[in-house]
Image (tube, rainbow, N blue to C red):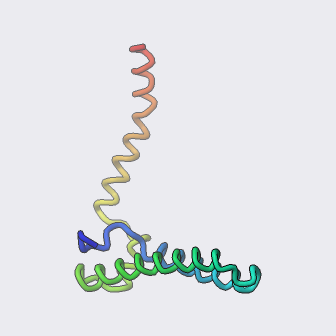
């Protein structure tokens, strides 16, 4: 909340998590005879997931001025920053065997 940014959080993940909690609430009512402890825990989790989703949508649309489509497609679209991070990660993976061999020689 303090940074006022949607950051790297995924609205798709937050939506799916909230939907999963809603399904758990329904099945708890149907199969567990409305166990209060389960209802409370799944209800709390759903509220927290919805609050994360609300923050992503609010800061993404109001502060960062992105469209809802852009926010939801951010998970599948590549950006220059993401490409650079992936290249750096590939380089680290490629160099790992060499680094391990050098440390074995020194030991």
Q: In which quadrant is the N terminus drawn?
A: bottom left
Quadrant of res 6: bottom left
Q: Is 106 situated above or below 10? A: above
Residue found at x 36% / y 85%: 68
Residue 11: x %, y % from top left: 43, 76
Q: Is residue 91 left or right of residue 14?
A: left
Instruction: Name the foreground residue: 37 vs 25.
Output: 37
Q: Is residue 88 left or right of residue 2?
A: right
Residue found at x 45% / y 18%: 104
Residue found at x 43% / y 40%: 93
Residue 58: x %, y % from top left: 31, 83
Q: Is residue 100 left or right of residue 61?
A: right
Q: Is residue 98 left or right of residue 39?
A: left
Residue 82: x %, y % from top left: 34, 60
Residue 27: x %, y % from top left: 70, 82
Q: In which quadrant is the C terminus drawn?
A: top left
């Amino acid at each position: 909340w303090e940074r006022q940014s949607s950051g790297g959080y995924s609205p798709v993940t937050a939506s799916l998590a909230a939907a999963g909690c809603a399904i758990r609430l329904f099945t708890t009512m149907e199969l567990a005879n409305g166990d209060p402890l389960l209802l409370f825990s799944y209800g709390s989790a759903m509220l927290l997931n919805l609050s994360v989703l609300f923050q992503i949508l609010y800061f993404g649309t109001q502060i960062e001025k992105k469209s809802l489509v852009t926010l939801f497609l951010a998970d599948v679209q590549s950006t220059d920053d993401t490409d650079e991070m992936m290249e750096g990660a590939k380089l680290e993976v490629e160099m790992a065997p060499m680094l391990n061999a050098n440390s074995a020689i020194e030991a």
